[in-house]
């Protein structure tokens, strides 16, 4: 078995890993690289593997940094199948279309500028017809089902507990003499005991492990701490009659925040306040969450059985049209605005940040990991002035972070999972999906937990005879 690490190596974006075995070429994830605009633009167009040579893609989950470059495969000759869970397939259907729409919209703006400067125009990375092509190749498979990929290779998905439909990927490769070699890919692991979703599984018997490292150097606060801090922010903006702006991914993070507000109100700990979810994609994603209740944990299932929708509450409104979005800027506080994108690299949140970062009464709440060179990272680092849509703004608003709202497992949860799946067969561990200090922390933890052969691959690194 041969492994080539093409993305999410020494970084958290662009997840893409090539597995070659028994004459098959299988891609684990096909995500978009996010970060520095120019660098991301070039990397996403330079596909590091010929799509026409791939036999299959196995997708861990629907987040764009794991799925977002799939239409590029179809655009350039991919003819295999994309294996994922049913919920991941439904989420990709809305997310990839949204990605294509946003790219075409941004491209129109860029090309208008380039045309006025007499420069060559850019072609789109992909278009809606490419999304249609790749979606026709999706092959949804439920958790725990053995899937024959051909040539002695089989696939099983296990629950990863990260977002709706997220999966651990188990590949078994039959070798000469009948022995199988098992590769386990964590995708993104969820934090245990988070609301809505069931906790991750512990598949056994791995010989080779690819493990995410996003928060390998820190632990998250408790869920009760999260609820208490959110309540505190709501009390604050009610007193100040100001705004709480939460940049949040449309899938996973937004639903988690809505659930927490629901619980605070149902428990009588929070007075309703206008909460605007300014993202058409978030509305569609929340509808997909409602459809796939097989992914829910017992607590969320119990709430549903009581006739309560765990992601609805008084004061909640989904904003759909651009005019409705613009109108929010003229409304007085108190109010909460939840808008994409989660790393502030595009979408409607940029317009809201323009209107709110200058007022010290307002709060910008960061609820997820912010990759290097993103506007979200500059906000966390309290860089001022901030450049937003080409204009500069002083950062006077208060900035807070709640890492526990991240859907990624922290150090303690990562090691709990590792100890649970670690067996006598485990010989090789690759620390991926983390910035350099995080993957180095992970390799150190793996060594402390009993596996000496742990490395953090760099982009493009190849490992033979794994």
Image (spheres, rainbow, N blue to C red):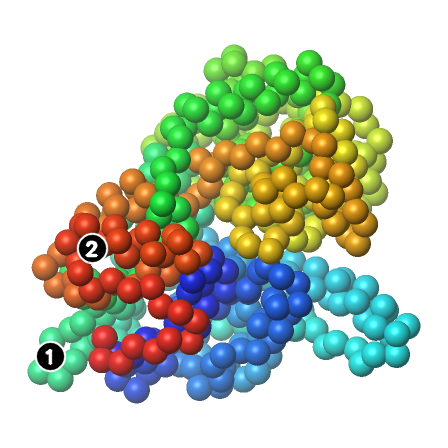
> Is residue 208 at all visible to an observer of this figure?
yes
Name the one closer to the observer, 410 or 170.
410
The residue under label 2 is 447
Q: Residues within 10 Å of mark 1 (few under 14, many from 20)?
A: few
Tell me the residue that label 1 is attached to: 178
Label 2, secondary structure: give it: helix
Cα distance, mark 1 to mark 2?
31 Å
Q: Secondary structure at mark 1?
A: loop
Which image quadrant for residue 224? Answer: top left
- Residue 280 position within the rendered picture, expressed as x and y whole percent measured from the top left: 68, 47
Q: In this orientation, which residue lies closer to the viewer: 353 or 107?
A: 353
Residue 276 appears at what percent x and percent y? 68, 33
Q: Is residue 168 visible?
A: no
Residue 214: % across, % down:
41, 51
Residue at 54% in and 35% down: 401
| Residue found at x 29% / y 40% | 412
Q: In the image, which disc is placed on residue 410?
A: none
């Amino acid at each position: 078995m041969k492994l080539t690490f093409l993305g999410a190596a020494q970084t958290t974006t662009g997840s893409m890993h090539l597995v070659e075995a028994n004459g098959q070429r299988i891609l684990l994830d096909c995500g978009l690289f996010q970060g520095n605009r120019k660098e991301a633009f070039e990397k996403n167009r330079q596909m590091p593997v010929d799509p026409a040579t791939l036999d299959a893609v196995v997708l861990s989950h629907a987040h764009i940094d794991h799925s977002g470059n799939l239409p590029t495969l179809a655009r350039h000759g991919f003819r295999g199948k994309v294996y994922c869970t049913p919920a991941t397939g439904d989420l990709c259907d809305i997310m990839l279309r949204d990605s294509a729409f946003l790219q075409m919209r941004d491209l129109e703006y860029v090309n208008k500028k380039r045309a006025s400067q007499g420069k060559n125009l850019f072609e789109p990375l992909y278009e809606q017809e490419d999304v249609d092509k790749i979606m026709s190749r999706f092959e949804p498979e439920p958790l725990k089902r053995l899937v024959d990929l051909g040539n002695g290779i089989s696939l099983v998905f296990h629950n990863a507990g990260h977002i709706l439909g997220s999966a651990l990927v188990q590949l078994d490769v039959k070798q000469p003499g009948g022995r199988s070699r098992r590769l386990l890919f964590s995708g993104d692991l969820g934090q245990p005991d988070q609301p809505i979703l069931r906790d991750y599984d512990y598949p056994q018997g791995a010989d080779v492990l690819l493990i995410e490292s996003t928060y390998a150097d820190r632990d998250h606060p408790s869920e009760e701490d999260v609820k208490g801090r959110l309540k505190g922010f709501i009390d604050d903006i009610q007193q100040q009659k100001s705004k709480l702006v939460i940049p949040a991914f449309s899938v996973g993070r937004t639903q988690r925040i809505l659930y927490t507000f629901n619980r605070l109100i149902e428990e009588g700990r929070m007075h309703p306040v206008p909460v605007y979810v300014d993202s058409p994609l978030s509305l569609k994603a929340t509808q997909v969450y409602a459809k796939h209740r097989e992914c829910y944990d017992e607590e969320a299932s119990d709430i549903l059985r009581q006739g309560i929708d765990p992601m609805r509450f008084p004061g909640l409104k989904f904003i759909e049209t651009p005019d409705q979005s613009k109108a929010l800027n003229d409304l007085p506080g108190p109010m909460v605005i939840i808008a994409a994108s989660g790393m502030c690299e595009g979408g409607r949140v940029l317009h809201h940040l323009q209107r709110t970062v200058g007022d010290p009464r307002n709060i910008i709440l960061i609820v997820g990991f912010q990759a290097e060179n993103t506007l979200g990272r500059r906000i966390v680092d309290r860089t001022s002035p901030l450049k937003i849509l080409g204009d500069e703004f002083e950062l006077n608003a208060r900035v807070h972070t709640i890492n526990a709202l991240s859907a990624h497992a922290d150090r303690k949860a990562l090691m709990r999972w590792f100890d649970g799946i670690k067996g006598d067969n485990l010989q090789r561990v690759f620390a991926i999906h983390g910035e350099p200090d995080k993957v180095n922390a992970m390799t150190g933890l793996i060594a402390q937990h009993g596996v000496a052969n742990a490395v953090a691959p760099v982009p493009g690194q190849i490992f033979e005879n794994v």
